[in-house]
Amino acid sequence: MNAAESDGPSGGLRRGSGNKNRRVLNSKKTDCQEKLKKIARALGIKIGSETWREMKDMANIDAGIIPDDIRSNGEVLKALPMFFRTIRSDKPTVEELDKLIDMIKKEG
């Protein structure tokens, strides 16, 4: 077995096969989304509702996944490191706070 096939830091994913790895991860994500939809339907939760979004967010958080709508917003994505530091009790810089305030103003 060579280094590309070992269960090292990549968690068993093979280097050099990025497209295949993405397909596997995306198919697992799709499977999870389908399971969530089945659960929502069984509970009478309307897909797309606020309750559905909260349920999906909680599942993403539990799986350690940043939700698609957050990842697709470049400005929000750039602010995540500051957010993480803040919730860890590390104070953001004045510049970072100003950028965050500007982002919030633009959203409103």
Image (cartoon, helix red, strand yellow):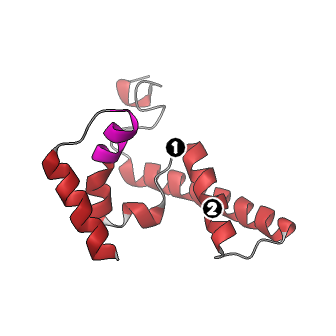
**Quadrant of res 107:** bottom left
The image shows residue 63 at horizontal and vertical percentages of 58, 44
Q: Count all numbered tags in the image, as a single digit.
A: 2
Above or below, comparing residue 73 to residue 90 in the picture: below
Q: Residues within 10 Å of mark 2 (few under 14, many from 20)?
A: few
- The amino acid beneath tag 1 is Gly
Q: Residue at x 27, y 72 (%)?
A: 105
Q: Is residue 66 magenta?
A: no
Foreground: 29 or 76? 76
Looking at the rendered structure, which numbered label has been put on residue 64? 1
Residue 26 image position (x, y, % from top left): 52, 58
Residue at point 63%, 61% (across, down): 54
Q: Amino acid at mark 2?
A: Glu
Q: Where is the N terminus found, in terms of image quarters?
A: top left
Q: Are marks 1 and 2 in contact (CB under 8 Å)?
A: no
SS at badge 1: loop
Nearer the N terminus, badge 1 or badge 2? 2
Q: Main secondary structure of the magenta part?
A: helix
- Please state which of residues 14 and 30 is positioned toward the viewer in this rendering: 30
Quadrant that contains the C terminus: bottom left
Q: Residue at x 31, y 57 (%)?
A: 77
Q: Nearer the viewer, mark 1 or mark 2?
A: 2
What's drawn in magenta, residue-wise? 81-89
Alpha carbon of mark 1 to alpha carbon of mark 2: how far?
15 Å
Asked where in the image residue 106 lies, by quadrant, the reply is bottom left
Q: Disc 2 designates what residue?
A: 54
Which secondary structure, mark 2?
A: helix
Q: Is residue 44 left or right of residue 83?
A: right
